[in-house]
Amino acid sequence: MPPAAETVPDKAEGARTERGSERPGAVDGTEGPARPTRLIPRARRSIRVRAAVAAALLTCLVFCLGGLLAGTHPFGPTTRNTVDLGQQYLPYHAYWRKLLLGEADGDLFLNWSTGFGSNFLGDYGTYLSSPFDLMVVLFPADRIELALYVITAAKIAAAGGAMAVLLLRLRRGPWPVAAVLGAAYALCGWTLNYAATVPMWLDGLLAFPLLCLVGEWARAGRRPVLGPLIVALAWFANFYTAYMATVGAALVLAVRLLTADDTGRRRLAGLVRAARAVLVGVALAAPLVLVIFLATRVADPTPEVTFTAVAWTEVFARVLPATASVASPALFIGTPALALALTLPFNRTVAPRVRIAWTAAICLVALSMQWGPTHLLWHAGASPNGIPYRQTFVLCGLLLIAAWISTARGLPGPAALLGAVALLAAMAFAARGSAVVDRWTYPAFAAALILAALAAAAVLIARRYAVGARVLPALAVVLLVLAQAGETAITGGRIEEKQLSQVSWAPRVGPWQDDMSRATARADAWPQHRTDPGEVPGGNDPLLVGGQGADYYSSLTSEVYSRTLSSLGFGFYAKGRHPVSLDNPVTDAIFSIGTRMRSTPSAPVRTDALPEAAITTTDTAVPPLVTVRPDVRLPARGTRFGDSAFANQELLLGSQVYEVPTARGGPDGPELRRTDGPELRRTDGPGNATTLTASCPANAQVWFWAPEYQGTAALGGGAPVSFHGKLPAVRGPMQPLGTVPASGSVRIDLRGERGAPKLPRQPVGCLVQERLDAAVRQLTARGATAVHVSGHTLTAELPAGSTGTAVIAAPRISGWSCAAGDASPAHAQRYLGLLAVSLDGKATSVSCSYRPPGLRLGGAIAAVALLALLAIGYRNRFLRRTARVHLECTSGSSDGK
């Protein structure tokens, strides 16, 4: 690596040298030139810009090369929509584009498209609040995958550039090396294995070096206004990973304060300024952060997770290339970069205090990732479902800072290099039996190590023999780039290939979604009634193709919504946070779904192609969005759902429309509302065969409901229907099996996959269409005569003299306020999980408005923080002006003498 230009500390920046390098021209305690040339700030800024641009370009190039090697979109036909990328983030970005262009049904507060009305500001803050996400408007609707890929690449590239700037701010050195290490940070294993398919986490990757820069400004007493604004932007963009980045930046600041040659007073002042920047910045982001926090408190709870640390051999394996796992920390930063980081403990040209502090910090962070209490600290007190090592990017950043500190003033000596190689070899040997090791792991590791060794040899030859002073260092940089870029591209490509084979995936957006989107737009009659697009490949279907369906997948899915739908026979994925649409005429009547889209693909769905689909549109008479229940009085404390989905549907509909056979032989229990139906007989046969028999009205539609059942169900020798319940992760929805024959006898043959099936007491319901039609006519006659929806408000006109309760077909999530007639709005009431308003017979209208909880309090906190920031800016400007006047007066006095 080329040697760095020697420079003195910049007093104007308030920089403080680390212990051992306080003498002018000294390099970590060694003698240097007596009076080195000082770089002016403008030239130094030019070097940092050059490094940032180079790092960003190299990052983008290598990231795209990895996709090219894997053959994934946009460089190949294969989908990259693995796990939640296709089911959550892609649909959310499609909806965000619609909202920005004024094409969505809701607004920034409320989303009417999914979840029958959900808190969109919370989802916005969770998935879409990054400034990069505004780029979606630059792409057409049918190129939303490309838009998301560009956003992802831009975030990663920006993180690489920011890290390069931070490295040069921490210590001056050759900008090409800073650019390479910045790219190594941006393309660490955490990015390639986790965050490239969870794009909102990438804002934390960018936040870490930016927050470290805020800490440097705080130490120097510079940029007191810009620092809090950057903190606010980081927490606004994604508060979850910004929290982790803030913890990591605090650790970096602590090390810098301990190793700086400052007085205790100056260190304390720098610490106070940093704390002030964080407090003001987080407070500025409070309107969004508080909304998300309160939304998580009412979200459907997922099962508690107990953290179990992986073996250290697995940790060592993850520093190697081409390894992938969501159960262990993805610590890959590139073999050359890791080798440079490992030289720090052995590098005697770095002051001992600096070496010890950074080495100890890295070891402590690594240990904290493996210990339960500190694991909870990193994850804000809650062990996450899924990836348990989400803070890994901070450790990757610390390793690259260590690599820079060890090499910024020149390549470490042979002893340090040999020590680093020995540690590398030991970790590679310890990881040899790990299951995550790929066939490309050790070949890529060896090739990168050889190229790095050649680069080091070129620098050592130039240093020792004084030959090739320009050529050999340049050759070393080229070899370093080849080693890092090649190994990282191979790692990225292999991770993408393995993800497609090991985890769930969604196909690319194609003709199926395009055709459904056009068909839904033609049929949409909102808010007269809802249009449900049904199930298309992926998830959050209405966000992508339009309509107003039940399908909703979010980390903030409310408990009341998930529990209400589960009680009515809907299914879910993701342990309750992804309720899916239910094609059932009773629930369609309850939720005013008057148009239902159904689609059948022309060919199997593949990772590299999405077939066309035949789409049908069915219109059904349903009650309006707001219905009146004269016999319901609020609060309905004694009214609650029971254990039968069929009885629950009838309770919410207000009419009995099913014949519900009931299994005898046990106590009815208080949760079984209907026991007046025919008897349901169960016969367990050999193996996994079970037969259910009962009697029902002729021509009734037979529905089967067993949330935990895995297997098939067939009516009277008809075609089998598959059920895939697997609680707590997956809840199976009720499904139709066919029509009751003229004899009225019902026989259902079950073939379970895991022994005798566990069934509820009332797994069968026979829907009598005539009863349902009568119930719909009755609700329509008493329902709203007109419904108006605008953004986050709903108004309905009611028949004169309406009494009882107006029930609105939307979940009663926190934040709703309603009023009848001219009454003052009050917190909305609830009836079986839905919005409800009491009627006294005088009001001829009801109105409801939604405001996300926490928005008002967060706004007040942000207003106070803004005033504090203005005061800080005014004070800083006043002090600068006073200092300038004092300097001029002093200068004038000297001239007079």
Image: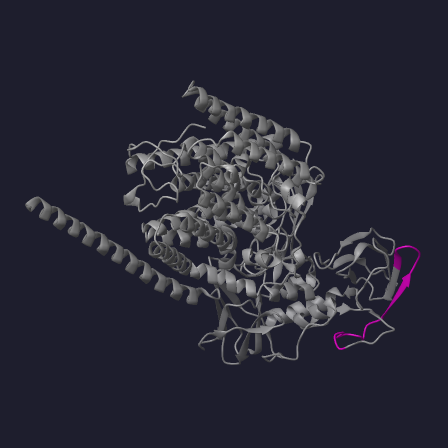
Q: State whether residue 81 is above or below residue 253.
A: above
State the image coordinates of residue 836 (x, y, percent, origin top left). Answer: 56, 73
Pick whichever, 591 or 122, lies toward us: 122
Is the N terminus in the top left, top right, bottom left or bottom right quadrant?
top left
Residue drawn at x 22%, y 52% as measured from the top left: 880
Residue 40 is covered by the magenta coloring: no
State the image coordinates of residue 643 (x, y, percent, origin top left). Answer: 74, 70
Quarter assignment of residue 450? top right
Residue drawn at x 45%, y 44% as measured from the top left: 354
Q: State whether residue 78 is above or below residue 382.
A: above
Residue 790 in sight: no
Looking at this view, name the residue that lies furthest to the right.
686
Residue drawn at x 75%, y 54% as measured from the top left: 724
What secondary structure is the stretch in magenta mostly built from?
loop
Q: Is residue 9 left or right of residue 564?
A: left
- Write the start and end of the magenta stretch as one range: 670-690
Q: State whether residue 776 is above or below residue 599.
A: below
Pick whichever, 700 or 542, lies toward us: 542
Pick whichever, 787 or 117, lies toward us: 117
Q: Is residue 225 left or right of residue 651?
A: left
